[in-house]
Image: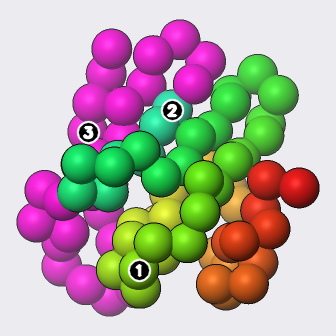
């Protein structure tokens, strides 16, 4: 398993080790603080956002989306992302 700290996309310097990506096989998982909040399947190019948590976690999720080539999204779009 590979793990790295995700960098912000909104002019912040850092997430201060509170936002990590774990990749195992074809699946990358976003961990915000200690909660798994989103997954990306490299084979199917499918992104799943588990739920809306907080504005800080939403910032983490948007950085995860951008990292894998997706557009950022609003709270409403995030709530329906895995439809």
Kindly identify which residue carries mark 1: 54
Residue 68's place in the image compared with 41, above or below, is below
Q: Residues within 10 Å of mark 1 (few under 14, many from 20)?
A: few
Q: Quadrant of the C terminus?
A: bottom right
Q: Residue at x 41, y 44 (%)?
A: 36
Q: Which mark is residue 4?
A: 3
Q: CA distance from mark 1 to mark 2?
A: 21 Å
Q: Pointer 2 and pointer 3: residues touching (CB < 8 Å)?
A: no
Q: Residues within 10 Å of mark 3 (few under 14, many from 20)?
A: few
Q: Which mark is residue 28?
A: 2
Q: Is residue 19 left or right of residue 49?
A: left
Residue 58 seen in render = yes
Q: Nearer the viewer, mark 2 or mark 3?
A: 2
The range drawn in magenta is 1-27
Give SS at disc 2: strand
Residue 52's place in the image compared with 32, above or below, is below
């Amino acid at each position: 398993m590979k793990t790295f700290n995700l960098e912000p996309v909104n002019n912040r310097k850092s997430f201060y080790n509170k936002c990590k990506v774990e990749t195992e096989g074809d699946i990358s998982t976003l961990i915000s603080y200690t909660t798994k909040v989103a997954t990306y399947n490299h084979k199917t190019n499918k992104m799943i956002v588990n739920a809306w948590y907080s504005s800080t976690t939403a910032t983490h999720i948007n950085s995860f989306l951008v990292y894998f080539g997706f557009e950022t999204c609003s709270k409403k779009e995030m709530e329906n992302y895995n439809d």
